[in-house]
Amino acid sequence: MTRVHERITAVLPVEAAFDYIADFATNAEWDPNTTAARRLDDGPVGVGAHYELHVQMGGRTARAFPTATESRLPSERASA
């Protein structure tokens, strides 16, 4: 399974930044290699959410279909 770890600086509160990044439908707004992103199902963002991404890789566009398998704030991970 591929794991993605990113580090950015933001002026938003941690919870607001987490909510924005956790919704992969916004991926094309913050990842320069993603040319399109959309949610494939309904319901709350979180575990089980399905997405379709179009990602530039080596001069080609690849389709990816990530599914959220874990969704916890960093502070929740530290206490788990």
Image (cartoon, helix red, strand yellow):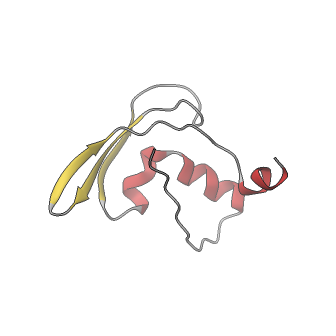
Residue 18: x and y in percent read 63, 54
Q: Is residue 70 left or right of residue 76?
A: left
Q: Is residue 57 left or right of residue 2?
A: left
Residue 74: x and y in percent read 72, 56
Number of dots carrying numbers: 0
Residue lying farthest front? 1
Q: Give 24 or 67, whichever is nearer the viewer.
A: 67
For the point 23% across and 59% down, the residue is 57
In this rendering, the answer to whether 7 lies above or below 55 is below
Q: Give 76 or 13, whichever is nearer the viewer.
A: 76
For the point 56% across and 48% down, the residue is 22
In this rendering, the answer to whether 23 lies above or below 17 is above
Residue lying farthest right? 79
> Which of the 4 quarters of the picture holds residue 38?
top left
Residue 26: x and y in percent read 44, 50
Q: Is residue 37 left or right of residue 18?
A: left
For the point 43% across and 62% down, the residue is 30
Q: Give 3 or 37, whichever is nearer the viewer.
A: 3
In this rendering, the answer to whether 67 lies above or below 12 is above
> Which of the 4 quarters of the picture holds residue 41?
top left
Residue 62: x and y in percent read 22, 48
Residue lying farthest top? 42
Residue lying farthest bottom? 9
- Quadrant where the N terminus sits is top left
Q: Is residue 19 left or right of residue 73?
A: left
